[in-house]
Image: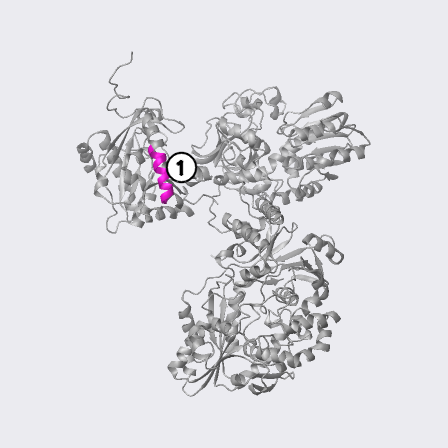
Amino acid sequence: MSSFISGGVSDLKRTARGWRWGRRSLVPRSAEPYLLPAQQTVFPSDWSRKRPAMAVREVVQKAGLEPLFRSQVRTKVEGLDVLDRIEGPVIFAANHASHLDTPLILLSLPDEWRRKTGVAAAADYFFDTWWRAVGSSLFFNTFPIDRRGGSMATTPGEVLADGWSLVIFPEGTRSKDGWMGNFRMGAAFLAHEHGVPVVPVAHRGTFAAMPRGQGWPSPGRRQLTIRFGEPLRPREGESVREFAPRIKHAVATLLDEDRSTWWEARRRAATGATPDPGGPDVAQWRRVWEQSQSPAAEGPARRLRAWGRR
Amino acid sequence: MILALEMFRSLPRTAVGKAIGTRMPGILSGYAAPLRLVTIDPPKVDRPGWARLRTRLSGICGSDLGALSGQTSLYFSAVVSLPMVLGHEVVAELLEDCEDLPAGTRVVLDPVLTCAARGVEPCENCAVGQTNRCSRITVGHLAPGLQTGFCKDTGGGWGQQLVAHRSQMHAVPEGWSDEQALLMEPLSCAVHTALRAGVKHNDRVLVSGAGAVGLFATLALRQLTPAGEIIVVAKHKHQRELAAEFGATEVVQPDEVLRRVRRSTGAFQLKPEYSPAYLLGGVDVAVDAVGSKQSLETALNATRAGGRVVLSGMPAAADLSAAWFRELEVVGTYASSQHEPGGRGAFELAAELAELDAVVRLSKSVASYPLHRWREALDHAHAAGRLGTVKVAFDPRSSQ
Amino acid sequence: MSRPGFVLEVDDRTPPMIVHEGLGFRLESFPLGTRVVYPPESIPAVPDVDEAIQHALLNPLDSEPLPALLRPGMRLTIAFDDLSIPLPTMKAPDIRGRIIEAVLTMAAEAGVDDVKLIAANALHRRMTAAELKHIVGERVFRSFYPQGDLYNFDAEDRDELTHLGTTEKGEDIEISKRAAESDLLVYVNVNLVAMDGGHKSVGIGLASYKSLRHHHNAKTMVHSRSFMDHKHSEMHHSAWRMGRIIKDTVKVFQIETTLNNDVFPSSFSFLQKREWEWSVKDQASMLGVRRGLSVAPPKLKHKMFHDMRSVYGLTGVNAGEVEAVHEKTLEKVHAQHSVEVNGQSDVLVMGVPYLGPYNVNSSMNPILAACMGLGYYFNSYRGQPVVRKGGAVILYHPLDEGFNQLHHPSYVDFYEEVLAESTDPAVVGEKYEQQFAQDPWYIHLYRTSHAYHGVHPFYMWYWIAHALDHVDEVIWVGGNRKAAARMGFRAATTLQDALEMASGTVGTSPSITYLHNPPHLLADVR
């Protein structure tokens, strides 16, 4: 019995040392040329779409994230009726200006949609250690996507195949000044490839509440607005290159609609006069100035109390 | 927009790193590393003499590891500006013309941000070519920062692009590999160390530590000074072989140093209570190339009265009793100078050393990682000695 | 994406490696600079096995399609490799069974009545009914065995042998009478390693002692360098000479198959993978298996290993004229097993696994361990041996399994009497081979029981003749001291001790090569 244990201990020690437990694994120098090309350096994410993870996520989001989020910002959600009329999975294509965008979108979706929506997050930042992978997945439904379009480009397809919707930020990264940047083709490509509709999503106010570089929303419960638009599908014979600009235009129109009224936005869209979502061609400080103003708030910052303070 | 590894202020991480970093070294490349991969605007300095560069290769140095694991003294907090992109051993190519160097030229950087780079009147040190002693490293056009890689305005080697001043650039000779060029900066620091050591003819020299700093110091001492016996303290087998190749007379394990020095110098060995042993007598010059308390005390304890101890690695707190009692000269060496004793610059001398066969062979074993695998790179660098690697570097152009 | 084999150089970053030793394995940390030869990963298997078989039978090489060769009233004999191949035994259904079914289907359509199936086991032991059934499949077994039309070849039944003459070098050719007098002899082979197949199938598999003694002897084997390379193997040259004469008398339709390198089933998948690519699951499996093996009683260990069934995939099947088919077969075998190795080294290290061709469902006695290590694994080279002349070989095997009285009775006498007197293959052959070959008791056991022929242990000893001639030092790590000494070798407890012992021959810092075998490899030594 004792030799069984001591043998086991010595095996364990040799294995722990030889395979560098607790450290990062290494490959012998002379074996480097023969490595499998798609070396996974991020953690796999299928577990996050299974029932146990979904149950934990429900608690974490409803009891943790949501109250915290609502204590820091106010939201106004429009266009959810679009979701009543379509079936998942869909791809939500949204503009990206802040880390607040993801919780805003997730917490604005109806519960059944939120439970089965995944958010694409940069693999090399959110998934390079197990605690980041687990944490971001439980709080924000994330799954890894390679920013440079490498081997993990297949994961979005797997997520869709599981029946989950995707949230993609076609700009690829957060805007520097709050205005919309160039849209990459990822969302259009996936919609084309897997035959799922694209629901454009436009939001305002997240840059004002928590811009790039700031770690917490600005005080004062700033107003955020979010609007969901009619789903887009690639037309018969339409290529990815032709479909992609339509998505950007749809988000731009939604932003216009959010800022003014639906009718005016439709009129401007028909004549091609939708204001450029990339912002005016003026000095940087003026661009940032405009975007750092929160959308008009509706209602007071804090709920009225039935009794005043004394 | 470029990809870069930025070090940021984070009290909890630094605290964790200091507390359990030695016991759980894995955490130093995990939670405890205050480093993040960010997409930022490429740095720009709109001043004459500055140019943008694209990084080809940038090394991880012991000082970088120290900064990331919270081991560096707070003394340096005044001469760095967070958040900063790390990386001061840089081989890069010019993205635009810079005075006499056309775009596309491959250069290696002297990272010190001197008066010339900062656009101020040369201080008393820069005026005589001792640029590593510049006193104006916190003022001028740039934020405080002793070197490129510790300044938030210039960017650093661990990013896809950075900016540098013409006075920092040294063109890389044709035919050199990037890895060879990468070793130029540590080699020039070693050259500076060797020349600061004041080695007289046939002096006995002890080099404590056989990482990149110690090995290159050995090489420089053998090639550029009239040293006699050079004893190198090395823990790992490949380090012993390399030290011998670079000109060490003998290589010993850390626990044998005192014994070996005692025997060859005929000194007396004393053992105080609850403290490490020391010699009355010993080597003429000792170079500490590790910076740990143990290594520094070994160097102090093994040097003869009136001898010189050279602090080549950033030192930790140590017992300086021997320095006082035995009237030792304790001398610091930092970076490299454009005007070494003899008149030539350290980079020029280093270029000659970098062409030696032994160094070219060593350059082939540089382990390089893409930026997004920085945790693996840090982990590898922390254990480089035991893993048989001398230098770990980042290749920001690769995505594998 | 199947990666090629390669030679690893052990450095500080290399984890410990698996070394097989009999019914178990150990983790060994080799000295820095040791070369480790890794076999290629499995090449892709054919998408549809049945389709591939049909294609081969209908489009043979240098021959008419099989249906054209079949007609009513003909005498058809189907011979097949016995269970010494593949190793480990293949998971059901065995590929030979599938091919034989395809052949018999065509024969039934053509109206052939006179069909016999013979297991080409030469002087190997007779297989049991269950073993035959495993190879040919249940359908074929039920149709032929009860009627006595499926049987093991009996090389000592004088009435069932035909002498076909001699080669130009005076070598007798005596094979199964039924096979020689058939209108068509179909041979179904599994070409696991480069030694198998070609003229070796009929010429050796269905031959008697009188034929075999011409090339199964010490002198021929010493000059087979190696016997995995038929172009440079004296044994194969002899078999080829015989085969060309057999061709003139018997119409042979050779069907050869090649397998990939998927040796171990999923529960032992860590033995298949390169160590630094082990996942946490693999590491845990390895630790678990080692703990299990350390407390398991010998019978359980034996069962655990011998119950393992391999999951080989078919990479190719070719049919037709023997030499044309064998060329194609070897192309695939070399593609699957070949690894380029630059230069020889002073020391060769090999781990001997629990199974060789001659102890399937049996135990590996010391002689079989020596044959596996110094015979098969030592000869897994082309060009020149992996170790230099006068170097040392270090093998891992406990050498403690004893002798199986049912399967290897003559081995006991060989071990106790013959080896005690001399371990030189030429000397023992000269003095004792004839006796053992003609001993009536052994012949009786061979013909009626399940024993290897009396002469078989000698063949094991000839198999290592080349190695014994080539190296100066053989050391068994972890081996039973007495068994090693009886065979003329030495034993050590650890690798370091073994290297110490070898330092007299190869010096204190020799160059070392470790063959990371199984999965199978063939070292192309430059």
- Residue drawn at point x = 36 percent, y = 38 percent: A57
Which residue corresponds to the image point at 64% horizontal and 45% vertical from the top-left? B361
Magenta extent: A49-62
Corner quadrant of residue B40: top left
Which element is circle 1 on?
helix
Q: Residue C250 at what x, y percent from top left?
A: 52, 84
Q: Residues within 10 Å of mark 1 (few under 14, many from 20)?
A: some
Q: In the figure, B28 relative to C116: above or below?
A: above
Q: How many marks?
A: 1
Location of residue C45 (image quadrant): bottom left
Q: Is residue B288 above or below residue C166?
A: above
Question: In the rendering, at what x and y percent does residue C464 appear?
Answer: 66, 68
**Left or right position of C484 against A161:** right
Nearer-the-camera pick, C139 or A271: C139
Q: Position of residue B267 (x, y in %)?
A: 81, 30
Main structural element of the magenta stretch: helix, strand or loop?
helix
The one nearer the camera, B121 or C488, is: C488
Quadrant holding the C terminus of chain C: bottom right
Tag 1 residue: A136
Image location (x, y in percent) of residue A67? 33, 29
Q: Is residue B209 left or right of residue C277?
A: right
Residue A55 painted magenta: yes
